[in-house]
Image: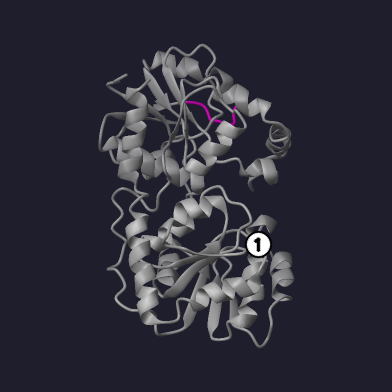
Amino acid sequence: MIADKIFFDARYIRFDHHDGISRFSAALFAALNMRTKVVAVIYDLRQLEKLPQGVEYIMANDPTSWREPFMARTLNKAGAKVVFSPMQTMGSIGRKYKLILTLHDLIYYNHKTPPAGFNLAIRVLWRLYHLSYWPQRLLLNRADAVATVSESTKRLMEWHKLTKRPISVIYNAAGSPTDDNHPKPPTSRPKHAQSLVYMGSFIGYKNVEVLIDGMKHLPDFELNLLSKISPSRRAELESRIEPAGGKVIFHNGVSETAYHQQLDRAVALVTGSQDEGFGIPLVEAMSRGIPVVVSDIEIFREIGGLAALYFDQNNPSDFAHQVKKLTANPAWIARSEASLKWSRHFNWSQSAGALTQMISEL
């Protein structure tokens, strides 16, 4: 099916700072807008600040509103023929258009803590929703097609028989389609502080413990933990630091610019996650020519490919061993070049192309 306009559910775009869904929405919208006419579906005019200038838009309800089940009334009235949503919860009662819904990952079936910021009622519904797969099936089977962001999640969706609809992969990526914040590729291994960078939360399954425990084997390195952290969690992790090992530095949150600066001076980006939905920091690091040293889990094998170094998530000494493989300049440069090459698998233009292909097959 070829539509003259694609209605894009941009209501998950945040107006303060991007989270994962917000960044995915804004970047994919911008890339799609370069290919075809796109209409933004928003609920707050501030969301337009994160979208290309001058885009056509319609106003709708907040996706957490009680009116969400009846969202199709707004879209039918606007004349929508094809609608894409970056989530699976968009209301569709009485729809007269083709609908593509998105399921990013299944991580909350294993880790049921709701995202921060949800009110009590939504947190309760969130936990109930993830007790069984049948609510997910009901939501996804309302669509004409379903998107996800990785082959790993697609396989899980098929394994659990989450939908009867065709599933396509629209990869997540780093930055935006017009991002010019990438430096020149590194020409040598960093010679200053031997910095390892971790970007991510400190929730249990992120397994930051394996990184901190591994620093006792890396006395010449420093581990920079960039994200915000609660005082109690920081105290818990600080108690694991070995005085004779490498330094562990808690930054408690950094700006986007500071994050890029940390990456550009790093020997490697590191993470020991036991489970993960995607792994955007891997793509962000590799796209700047920074090697990645990550736990050996399926999604990281997909995102890191042959460029990454992998370690046993339960073995701090194996983590340190993989980091030490980057000690020599020739080995580091080889990984840097491999990272840059592999990162090209993940770009918004290709993702927009995958979405337009989905629409053409409706």
Q: Residue at x 49, y 38 (%)?
A: 12
Question: Is 62 a magenta residue?
Answer: yes
The colouring scheme, among rainbow, by chain, secondary structure or one colour, is one colour
Q: Position of residue 264 (x, y in %)?
A: 39, 71
Q: Is residue 247 left or right of residue 339?
A: right
State whether residue 226 appears in this view. Answer: yes
Q: Which residue is mark 1?
A: 207
Could you tell me which quadrant the N terminus lies in? top left
In the image, is 88 to the left or to the right of 125?
A: left
User: Which amino acid type is marked by label 1?
Assistant: Asn
Farthest residue toward the bottom? 244
Classed neighbour count for the residue bearing mark 1: other residues with Cα under 10 Å, few (<14), some (14–19), many (≥20): some
Q: Is residue 30 above or below residue 68?
A: below
> Is residue 250 shown in magenta?
no
* Residue 38 image position (x, y, % from top left): 32, 30
Q: Main secondary structure of the magenta part?
A: loop
Magenta stretch bounds = 60-65
Residue 326: where, in percent of width, then height? Answer: 45, 76
Q: Quadrant for residue 209, please give it.
A: bottom right
